[in-house]
Image: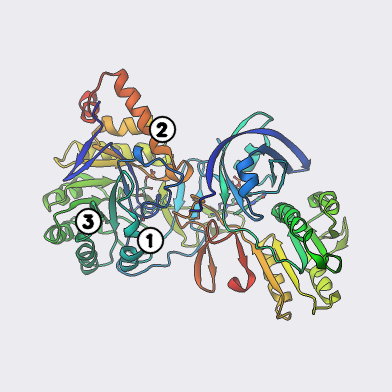
Amino acid sequence: MNLAVNIGKLKLKNPIICASGTFGFGDELKRLVDFSSIGAVVSKTITAEPREGNIPPRIYETDCGVINSIGLANPGVDSFIKEKLPALGRLKTNHIISLGGFSEKEYKQLVEKLDKQDKVDAFELNLSCPNLGKEKLISQSQKLSSDLVKGLRKLTKKTLIVKLTPEVTDIVKIAKAVERAGADAISMVNTYFSLAIDIETKKPYLGNVTGGYSGPAIKPMSLYRVWKVANSLRIPVVGGGGITDYKDALEFLLAGAAAVSLGTINLTDPNAAKDILSGVKAYMDKNKMKKISDLRRSFNG
Amino acid sequence: MQAKVKQFNVKLREVKKVKDDIFLLSFQSSHIARVAQPGNFLHLKLQSTILRRPLSIHKIENNLIYILFKVRGRGTKALAQKRKNDRLDIIGPLGNGFKIKKGENSILVGGGIGVAPLLFLAQKLVECSTFNVQRSTLENIILLGAKDRKEVVCEKEFKNLGFRIKVATEDGSKGQKGFVTDLLKKQLMAYDLELRTHVYACGPKGMFYQISKIVKQYKDLDTQLSFEQFMGCGLGVCCACVILTKAGYKKVCQDGPVFSLKEIY
Ligand SMILES: Cc1cc2nc3c(=O)[nH]c(=O)nc-3n(C[C@H](O)[C@H](O)[C@H](O)COP(=O)(O)OP(=O)(O)OC[C@H]3O[C@@H](n4cnc5c(N)ncnc54)[C@H](O)[C@@H]3O)c2cc1C
Ligand SMILES: Cc1cc2nc3c(=O)[nH]c(=O)nc-3n(C[C@H](O)[C@H](O)[C@H](O)COP(=O)(O)O)c2cc1C
Ligand code: FES
């Protein structure tokens, strides 16, 4: 059985990707986690300047999901290069570096600084963080997304993955524009806008008032969007949102995702990738499938 | 992440009700018994919740690890319903615990269920002071604060370790009527402060704030506080669990849960 998948120029040994913000910068969990089951780790989103992050509490659990408002806390790109990057590359996985910016200039700075680093296997452009108190996310605008990707495409030959928000009227339209602008792949979905209120104190639970919703609750909505986009584009889609076990992962792969991303589940089970991969393998075995794309082809949708 | 952290699937030896809504559970782990420091916590996976729940190590005896917990919501409710021989997925021991100060008077302050990690601390304090020549002149005291008598637990255990015990309840149903911080104020006044004293506390934030006001006038007094925050990973990777310190946001799961009072107030 061949589990390898291609995302742009990047070859992953298997289609399981640990999503941004839920796995540190790359190697922090190495003593606890078996990296041989992880196709790639996406780093916590890195910004041009250091960021303290949002006012706590930053996380709230509902009956079936998790709201977070971390606010892209990170040490900034220079400190990342000096302190975190050297440790990467020793593990048997690929490292995708997630980039977040507040202007085209910042994204360009980030790509320029990181493009020459060997240990960076690919970029994921986070155009979809809901926790920055901005009116509009970049990936809510077809024009902003497209212009940004066009500009950055000229600066790097590395694989460029673009992460989209599900919070738009027509995600296919945005994804197509990003594809035309030169992206190698789409990553989706980032979290959904959300709010939770403590009725005793009449205050929001989160220090930042609102947050991004993830976990089991968002799976059906995310699966729908991944299915729509994967079937409208030529470039691969890294699909996820609410995956907790191998069955969820299989749904995304059947719906057309080239690879799957695990977010919230990593917080609970840092070794989730291992269980999910072995479940996917067993299913493929049973169904006499030889490669990951057989899953997609077998879907009777 | 510290090297001592591991993931275990343990079999529960016992889950019992201590009082009202407070429960005690235990399981065997020679690894945790060997490496754990007082103030460390364990991150427990529960079927009823999405995220794990952090609970402190309450005491360790003969490789048996104890957790003392109060039922608050979904997670702790499910935990209280566990039975002997049920399995439990835990990650730990986690966090930076209490630093033990030798050769000083120890005042432990527990607010409500905040007493949980203080028994393990008391065990270690006693262990350390056995080798201490000054022992006879030093004192170990635990101040227990609670809403009412039903929330006062562990007196016998502290007594067996040779601790002096003082209790305050808000409704006066046990010990002195009032707050545990009133006891602390009195205790500090009673001391000859040339003898150094160390305060270790765990409880609600309001209690910490009161403590910070009381200890301000004692320049040489060191105080360590064990904080709570809502957590994601518990492993230092998600940045969910921060609290504000004088040096910016710090992670309770990794930089804490124990902080020096001077770092915060
Ligand atoms: C390091 C550490 C050690 C601890 N040790 C112990 C211990 O030894 N014993 C013990 O009994 N407890 C301990 N606690 C507290 C314990 O973790 C909580 O009581 C437990 O997580 C509650 O889980 P639950 O599912 O039962 O309640 P939950 O369902 O999580 O709800 C608890 C309450 O918190 C509220 N809440 C939930 N999320 C938020 C939010 N983001 N903002 C504001 N309010 C919120 C809920 O509305 C509810 O009122 C410790 C906590 C930490 C951080
Ligand atoms: C605690 C937390 C932090 C996150 N931080 C980031 C981030 O820094 N950058 C990003 O692109 N996505 C971030 N995300 C979103 C996840 O990568 C993922 O897209 C989303 O949670 C949906 O997947 P899930 O339901 O599997 O968690 C974060 C999610 C969580 C729960
Ligand atoms: S809970 Fe994730 S960093 Fe502390």
Which element is circle 3 on? loop
Location of residue A150 (image quadrant): bottom left
Which three-letter amino acid code belongs to the residue tagged 3? Asp
Which three-letter amino acid code belongs to the residue tagged 2? Asp
Closer-to-camera residue (A23/B133): B133
Residue B179 appearing in the image: no
Q: The N terminus of chain A is located in which quarter? A: top left
Q: Are marks 2 and 3 in contact (CB under 8 Å)?
A: no
- In the rendered image, residue B223, in percent from the top left (x then y), is placed at 68, 69
> Mark 2 to mark 3: distance in Å?
30 Å
**Mark number, residue A118:** 3
**Mark number, residue A72:** 1
User: Looking at the image, is mark 1 or mark 3 earlier in the sequence?
Assistant: 1
Which three-letter amino acid code belongs to the residue tagged 1? Leu
- In the rendered image, residue B204, in percent from the top left (x then y), is placed at 67, 60
A152 vs A163, left or right, is: left
Q: How many marks?
A: 3
Kindly identify which chain the residue marked by label 2 belongs to. Answer: A
